[in-house]
Image: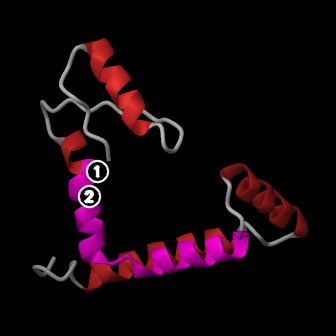
């Protein structure tokens, strides 16, 4: 790519295409009455009181993604997992439980405190 700005024209085109596909997918999850009911049920399950506001928030977040943001996310979340000799363990847990579970896992493994992402 061309330094600093998030890549050249081909990279920018790829980012735009990916964003368009994700936005289409996001909005198509609400294409029918049945889809809307399913999304409403998910909102209720996740404690989201305003589904339409959540859709707007997700859309805005996707539209805000650019090359530098992708590079930052890659360096923070992906690069270490692809580095030979570096061990990565992924632990998934319910929202708000990360700190407690990280302490439990660190204690059980007898290792240094886990880094939460």
Q: Are marks 2 and 1 in contact (CB under 8 Å)?
A: yes
- Residue at coordinates 10% horizontally, 79% vertically from top-left? 3
Q: Residue 101 at what x, y percent from top left?
A: 41, 28
Instruction: Name the outermost residue toward the bottom.
Output: 9
Q: Residue 53 at what x, y percent from top left?
A: 65, 76
State which quadrant residue 35 falls in.
bottom right
Instruction: Name the outermost residue toward the right.
Output: 33
Above or below for 89 versus 47: above
Calculate the distance from the C-alpha at mark 2 to the C-alpha at mark 1.
5 Å
Choose between 89 and 96: the one closer to the eye: 96
Q: Is residue 81 left or right of residue 66?
A: left
User: Mark 2 packing: few (<14 Cα in 10 Å), some, or many (20+)?
Assistant: few
Q: Is residue 64 magenta?
A: yes
Choose between 70 and 14: the one closer to the eye: 70
Q: Main secondary structure of the magenta part?
A: helix
Choose between 41 and 68: the one closer to the eye: 41
Residue under numbered circle 2 = 74
Numbered disc 2: secondary structure:
helix
State which quadrant residue 49 falls in.
bottom right
Residue 113, labelled with which disc? none
- Residue at coordinates 75% horizontally, 55% vertically from top-left? 44
Q: Is residue 34 left or right of residue 105?
A: right
Numbered disc 1: secondary structure:
helix
Q: Residue 65 at what x, y percent from top left?
A: 38, 76
Q: How is the image coloured?
A: secondary structure
Residue 77, labelled with which disc? 1
Q: Residue 113 at what x, y percent from top left?
A: 22, 29
Choose between 14 and 29: the one closer to the eye: 29
State which quadrant residue 10 falls in.
bottom left
Provide the residue span drawn in magenta: 50-78
User: Mark 1 packing: few (<14 Cα in 10 Å), some, or many (20+)?
Assistant: few
């Amino acid at each position: 790519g061309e330094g600093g700005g998030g890549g050249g024209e081909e990279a920018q085109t790829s980012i735009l295409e990916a964003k368009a596909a994700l936005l289409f997918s996001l909005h198509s999850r609400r294409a029918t009455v049945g889809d809307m009911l399913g999304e409403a049920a998910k909102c209720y399950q996740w404690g989201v009181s305003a589904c339409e506001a959540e859709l707007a928030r997700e859309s805005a977040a996707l539209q805000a993604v650019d090359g530098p943001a992708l590079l930052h996310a890659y360096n923070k979340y992906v690069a270490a997992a692809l580095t030979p000799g570096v061990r990565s363990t992924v632990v998934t847990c319910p929202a708000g439980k990360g700190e407690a579970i990280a302490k439990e896992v660190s204690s059980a493994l007898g290792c240094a405190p886990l880094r939460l992402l």
